[in-house]
Amino acid sequence: MDGVPDLLRQLDYELWAASATARSLAGPGAPQVALRRFAHLAGAHALWLARVEAGAEPLPVWPELDVVASLGVVRDAVTRWRALAADPAALARRVEYVNSKGASWSSTLGEILVHLLLHGAYHRGQIASDLRAAGREPAYTDFVQAVRSGALDGGRPPTAPG
């Protein structure tokens, strides 16, 4: 990774992947466990933002939200994360917080962002498995798909070799 530009690109990917996942969860018949995991992604973003911004926790880490509300939380969070991550010095800022088990910790903003990005990918994989088990087609949310489709980098798909 190359610092701020890569983190901003990864945040764009996070929103793209969340949007694709929301589309795959839309409509009747989505497994409840998958909907709950998607709401958890939103709750995690809100929780970490509250820690970073030293605000009250607006949502529980496992909130009860529908797909549209969950995506709205992620969309808002990504906007706020992008603003925070745009300053290279901010990525090194230490954030003191208490985790859900009551233990005190300290992490840098950069570490928190990487955690959230990996956390999202992990749970989107679970959601894809949940959807397949229910006979539904999950979204294809691989990072390389976002790049190939032109969803990142201003909508310009890469040039194929050869």
Image: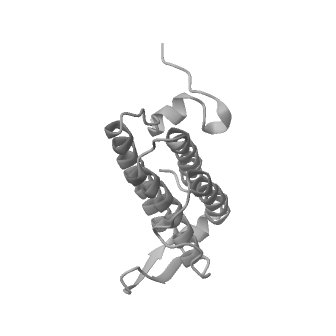
Q: Residue at x 49, y 83 (%)?
A: 96
How many dots with numbers?
0
Position of 124 with respect to 158 (left or right) is left
Residue at (66%, 33%) from the top-left corner? 155
Determine which quarter of the picture holds residue 76.
bottom right
Query: Where residue 27 sits in the image (x, y, percent)?
Result: 54, 40
Query: Residue 145: x percent and y percent?
Result: 48, 32
- Snapshot colouring: one colour
Left or right: 100, with 86 as reference point = left
Question: Toward which corner of the image does residue 30 lie, by quadrant?
Answer: top left
- Residue sitting at 52 percent across and 72 percent down? 47
Residue 104 vertical position relative to residue 30 in the rendered view, above or below:
below
Q: Nearer the viewer, residue 55 or 159?
A: 55
State the image quarter where residue 152 is shown. top right
Write the residue at 54% across / 54% down.
7
155 to 111, vertically: above or below: above
Front residue of this view, candidates 70 and 75:
70
Q: Position of residue 19 (x, y in %)?
A: 57, 44
